[in-house]
Image: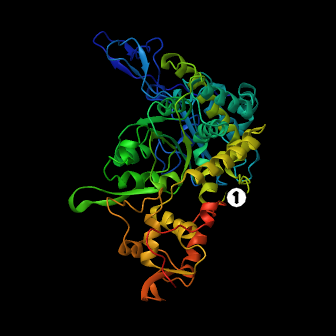
Amino acid sequence: MSTRPHPRLKSTTTPDGPHAAEPAPPPAAVGEPKGAARKGVVTALSRSNRFPAGAHPGADPTPARPGIRIYAPPVYRDHEDGARWSTRHGDTPTAAYACPCGHTRTARGREAVAVLVTDYAAHTAGCTRVRTHPHRPRAGGGGRAGHRLRRPHRRLHPDPHHAGTEERRMIPTIDGAALLDEVEAFHRRFNVFPTEAAFVAVALWDAHAHLLDCFDSTPRLAFLSPEPGSGKSRALEIVETLVPHPMVAVNASAAALFRAVSGADGRPTILFDEIDTIFGPKAGDNEELRGFLNAGHRRSGVTYRCIGDGGNQTVQAFPSYCAVAVAGLGSLPDTILTRSVVIRMRRRARNERVEAFRARIHEAEGRKLRDRLAAWAEQARASVVGAWPDMPDGVTDRPADVWEPLLAVADAAGGDWPRRARAACLALVKAAQTTDKHSLGIRLLTDLRDHVLIGVDRLPTIAIIDRLNALDDAPWADLDGKPLDNRRLSRMLGEYMTADNEPIRSRNIRTAGGVLKGFHAADLTDAWSRYCPPPQDSATSATPLQPSSEPVNL
């Protein structure tokens, strides 16, 4: 058997005559990372499979370019201490994989990355679209230095035969119901919410923020109160410790928010305190910010902006989809309220006690719960992605969109949470309908039905205005300093349609004193059925008001 010849050593000729081999390079300093480790581990795959053709080294795999990408933070030599190696800012490992069958997943954090590797191993082992001879690491562990992760301190193998059993032993299954119980208990230590349903809703909202990519929409969480000192900011502080990538914003612009959502650091969970400074009665117009919050409710929501200078501008779409929690005094615009789980906060009573929140102590406890929520979310992702939870009776349309992600999380957690979640859904949806002030137009339609056009099929405009202005708890006698008049009444009702799809307009009504302009109840029936809440069963709604002027003889 012939031996393979050794390569000839390079040599140089010295004046002394003998040929000496070129001296070897000096050995690396002890502890100094080598090769790719110096630049940061970007994957657990070999270089041949690390970046598919046409893919950028930092890009996630796609079904067209399948594979797994694992990124661990790079290290660098500290500029003040050359002998010490440090981690860069943002030292959280991330991972992503894609299968030719279309299945994709992402993860962030040590435990979540390990769970993703296990899931990748299990999926590739059973998927028929995966090639039959998956890549195996080089025998003897002689791969490049970039193949070994520095965080977490264990080797991650993309080979399903190598990784599955070991990783399953390292990552036990997390009990979702027990974990949500702990999240709820953590809130109860520092918050006093008005109802039990509020604790359930907030705990589910915290968990849903870790599964945002599984849903078509995300509800806003709104802590509102009539007076300061009601625990709204404290509630946001506790939420901040439990959600992924929290971004606390106070008086932030829409441009700052949508650029943060589409930034390279990952989608944030926006926590907007003092929202009344944006939408309160003393605030100016903030339609741009309201548009951003409304668009980000849906997964497909984007914000379009022109990028470039002069004539080289192009239109770019910035993603707006993200979880948002707000806190403030008063109320919110109707378009945001209808997309929110609203918690009406109130000041603590003298007999209500909570634990003092100390950020240096309790933030660490909340972050541990957050990491466990992230790990559980990765385990539950498969059951949540295709879930269509059953809605309680009467919850449809926008309220169903709001509660669908929270009920899906409750169903995935199991235990008593599915029942509690649906009870909380009914309670909070009903409370929102009771406290909803509606728009001024809906208030007008409702007052016409319940207090004005009772027992009559038509009424002149002058009589309608007289009866509306006589309502004690209605705004009609003082609209921006002026009482309601016939022109404004006609303009407001003209925005709604009759059953024949024509604008509601005044018509001639013949009376004993002549012909007057007025409105017919038949023209309003269709609008009443579509926009107004169900009639109240009370004596007030059944008895017509006695107007201050003389009744009109029809």
Query: Can residue 133 be seen at all in this image of the molecule?
Result: no
Total marks shown come to: 1
The answer to which of 361 and 537 lies nearer the viewer is 537
Query: In this rendering, would 81 be left or right of 395?
Result: left
Q: Which part of the image, by quadrant, shows the N terminus?
A: top right
Q: Nearer the viewer, residue 211 or 123?
A: 211
Dot 1, crowdedness within 10 Å: few (<14), some or many (≥20)?
few
Q: Secondary structure at mark 1?
A: loop
The residue at 42%/26% (across/down) is 89
Query: In front: 90, or 9?
Result: 90
What x and y, as percent, mark residue 171?
71, 28
Quarter of the image for residue 306 reads: bottom left
Specify the quadrant of the image occupied by residue 303: bottom left
Up-down: is 491 above or below 71? below
x, y (%) of residue 390? 74, 54
Tell me which colouring the rendered structure shows.
rainbow
Residue 486 percent across, percent down from the top left: 38, 75
Residue lying at 74% horizontally and 35% vertically, measured from the top left: 161
Q: Quadrant of residue 311?
A: bottom left
**In screen coordinates, is 451 left or right of 1?**
left
Q: In the picture shown, does residue 172 fall above or below 314?
A: above
Is residue 285 something one can see in this rendering? yes
Q: Position of residue 55 (x, y in %)?
A: 49, 48
Determine whether 214 is above or below 187 in the image. below
The furthest residue to the left: 310
Towards the viewer: 149 or 449 = 449
Q: Amino acid at mark 1?
A: Gly
On screen, residue 1 above or below 393: above
Residue extending furthest toward the top: 16
Residue identified by numbered label 1: 394
In the image, farthest residue toward the front: 550
